[in-house]
Image (tube, rainbow, N blue to C red):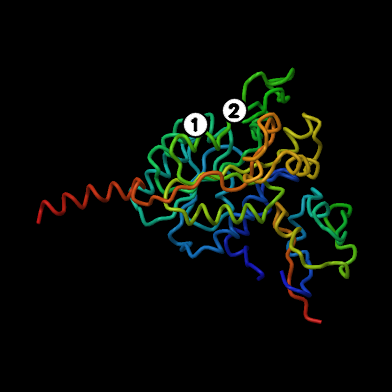
Amino acid sequence: MAKGDKVTLANSGWCKRCGICVHVCPTDVLKLGQDRVEIDDIDKCIGCENCELSCPDFVLKVVKVNE
Amino acid sequence: MAVDIYKYLREDKLPHIWCPGCGHGTILNSLVRAIDQTDIDPDKTVVVSGIGCSGRAPGYLKFDTLHTTHGRAIAFATGIKLANPELNVIVLTGDGDGSAIGGNHLIHGCRRNIDLTVILFNNQIYGMTGGQYSPMTPTGAVATTSPYGNIDQDFDLVDLTRSAGATFVARGATYNPRQMTKLYKEGLEHKGFSFIETLDQCPVNYGRKNNIGGPTEMLDWQKEHTVPASKWEKMPEEEKEGIFPLGVIHRKDDPESEYTARYQQIIDSFAKEDE
């Protein structure tokens, strides 16, 4: 976890739409799409890694974003 | 501190077979992060499991792995450790596999204090076979084999393993993956029998039948029904009912009482006689 890190969908195809990541996100970055999780507002992401650590399906990854 | 967890996973086997919202994936996620934080050699690590949903876990891990018969994971792991004491042996077992079918192996593993790291996935139900009650199903809970409520008492595995002689006993919960990683890391580094029970959610066969709800509601349930171990000790007895302490419950550092170390002493004593 470092400043400026943002969440990415590293393995979107593995998502089972359980909603745990949406639940643990403190800033409502993620939302549930039709079949998979989607990023709703990336600007809100604080890089806390809650979603990455809680995801049972290894879908999300918080990475350094080069701006 | 981006951790490349994918290097520990057999990516060709993913996505895994576990149901949406199952906590087993979170446990696996925390375990590989814990392994990454220790300096143990992945080439000298063996992961052993029994049967059940938890038994599938080693199939997704890129180590030497063994998927054994029902309840016998600790028995196989004891053999591996005794034959090759330099290996790090991790046992992944479920509540039914570890406390019912393999209950005897568990207590004797503790008694011998052999250097294994046992992670018990406690989802409080037999998930794979359709939701029969297990020894960890709480009294009164509904399962397919207890439609009017379970009349059995559930085990307190932390107390059981502690009194059987395990030298590192802890409990984690899937709602707190950071603590889980920390406990697994301590368990992996501990010399002696390490037992880490992990509260886990089975939304399909336990949560919805007991009106707790889906995966997110089950995580909230865990949060409401657990307290840190330090706080639990100060709580009055009547408030402890139905509440689980989390964290390291018992720890005794005594590497000389470890089973393979004692066995090596016998071998060394014969080597001296031969000289």
- Count residues near mark 1 (Cα–Cα under 10 Å), then give few for <14, some for 14-19, many for 20+: some
Residue plotted at (72% across, 20% down): B149
The secondary element bearing badge 1 is classed as helix
Residue that label 1 marks: B103
Q: Quadrant of residue B193?
A: top left
| Numbered circle sitting on residue B46 | none
Question: As displayed, is residue B13 above or below residue B102?
Answer: below
Q: Secondary structure at mark 2?
A: loop
Question: Sequence order check: which comes first, mark 1 or mark 2?
Answer: 1
- Label 2 sits on residue: B135
- Crowding at dot 2, Cα within 10 Å, few <14 / some 14-19 / many 20+, comes out as many
Q: Position of residue B82 (x, y in %)?
A: 34, 47
What subunit carries mark 2? B
Q: B79 and B186: which one is in front?
A: B186
Q: Measured from the top left, where is residue B274 in percent x and y?
A: 10, 53
Residue B127 placed where, x, y %?
66, 34
In the image, B7: left or right of A28?
left
The residue under label 2 is which amino acid type? Answer: Pro
Q: Are marks 1 and 2 in contact (CB under 8 Å)?
A: yes
A5 up-or-down from A26: above or below: below
Residue at far bottom of view: A67
Whole-percent x and y of residue B257? 35, 46
Chain on which label 1 sits: B
